[in-house]
Amino acid sequence: MKSIQASEIEYVDVIVVGGGIAGISIAEFLARHSNLTIKVLEKSPKLGNLASGKLEGWFHTGALYSGQDDAQTFINCVNGVEDIINLYSPYFSENCNINLTEKHPNFYTPTIIPNPQGWFNDQPVYIIHPKADAPEISSSRLKSDAVQINIQRNRVLGRLEVAYGKQHNWKNHNTCIAPTYAQVENHEGLSCSLRQSTQTIRNLCSQFDYSYGINPSDYEILHTLDCSMNTSKILRDLVASCLTQGVTFETGVTIDKLLMDRYGPIRLKSLICQTQQGLPKRLKAKLFIFAVGEGFKPFLSDLQIRARLKRSRSAMVVAYPALAHNNFVRMSTKNRFHFNHFIQQREKGKQKFIYSMLADSGYARDGEEEGVDIEPILESAERYFGQEKLYNRHLFSYECVKTEFISEEEQKRRYSYWIESNPQSNYLCVLPGKFSFFPTVAYQAYQRIKTLIEFEETFPKTPFDSKTLKDIKEQAATLVADSYPLQIFTQAT
């Protein structure tokens, strides 16, 4: 006689599927502003172990997208700065170290506040923007290349000056207010108060030019609000806040089936799952939120989601110890000249790792058998840092997967967030696009959730204080995975 295996049944108000930055930030914000019972499911053994843990940790405030034809992604990043200052800096006052500072009398702009324990490193990202005498232009036979690089340069200077220079006062009636799309696009003028450099950056530019056999060229070098961020710390603080609000987490969960009610408006009745121990489980809720990144594909048909999703793979190269002490990105109209260098610092026990993250704009589409070519990244690194310095480091490479949506208006990659729901359904689908969008994604998802289920809104009376919550902090640290480079170092040593 076969033994009967019982299936556990669990009910909560809200189930969040996906334990990356999107799912965790939505659960945290919803828990902070409601009395709903919330459960987060993750297929990996730990939270933040997939795309959220493999990124280079670039906090995007718009600099990288300031030269694009369409300013929408730039504005999305700028709006994200407004959201984090209004919605996160007051609550996570210990560690969310970005806020408005008075640069001139009664004139405020966002600033990264130095804090060794903060989410953001106060070392800025310098934009290196070439001019007509740079290698990619001087070696070209096309006059249009010089015209295009000049158009892009003008966009970068103008948009960044409006957003973070001396054109827009971010403080209005004690609230942080970002510039509008119209303000950004209507500004004319090439004067930019963000022009700033370091000797290290100038030396790197000169070395790059010498590698092409030309004398040092004239670059626009801008000090931006972009910076590196400690993604693991952000995730752990958000999880700790979740735990204080009663959110539960379950990892190692496999979803076998979505049980749909197809009579009338399509609604999700239950998730049929297997626990980490291989036991069957049925999960029911008022509302289901899918924030599963690259795992969306199996669910699209059942949920009748019409959005076109695109997965692409990009390469990261990790160099330890770090190659330089500055963050910089080279912008260009030619993809093969794009290059990013980021400094990251992580600790494991008593050991501290300070390392470089190297990347470019190369990617491979999902389904292509060949992996992403890291040779262009290594070649650029050789030109900036020299072969000897580069290959005397411990070097590792890996691929990360980005899941994005393709807009209906134009068939191109869009680094923007995506939230979709049906007013008559009981589920919500979310893609953050970038880690940096988590404040906006959480807030916008919250606004959408209010249209799908009824609940009483609450507002925290005091900031989150992790100093008095040692057990909670330890539990959060156990739940969240180390960043992928730190996992590599730990295994290698």
Image (cartoon, rainbow, N blue to C red):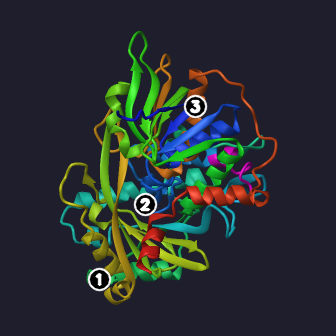
Kindly indicate the quadrant of the structure image that contains residue 36.
top right
Q: Quadrant of the C terminus?
A: bottom left
User: Neighbour class for label 3 at 10 Å: few (<14), some, many (≥20)?
Assistant: many
Q: Which residue is mark 1?
A: 211
Q: Amino acid at mark 1?
A: Ser
Left or right of 198? Residue 114 is: right
Q: Nearer the viewer, residue 39 or 387?
A: 39
Q: Amino acid at mark 2?
A: Lys
Counting residues from the start of the chain, the first of labels 1 and 2 encountered is 2
Say if residue 192 shows up in the picture: no
Q: Which residue is mark 3?
A: 14
Q: Residue, x 60% and y 75% (percent of image)? A: 349
Left or right of 472? Residue 335 is: left
Q: CA distance from mark 2 to mark 3?
A: 28 Å
Write down the region rendered in magenta. Answer: 84-94
Depicted 489 relative to depicted 180: above or below: below
Question: Does the segment drawn in magenta span residue 89?
Answer: yes
User: Neighbour class for label 1 at 10 Å: few (<14), some, many (≥20)?
Assistant: some
Image mark for residue 323: none
Q: CA distance from mark 1 to mark 2?
A: 31 Å
Q: Main secondary structure of the magenta part?
A: loop
Residue 225 image point, x, y percent: 57, 60
Q: Nearer the viewer, residue 223 or 140?
A: 223
Q: Which residue is mark 2?
A: 54
Kindly indicate the quadrant of the structure image that contains residue 392.
bottom left
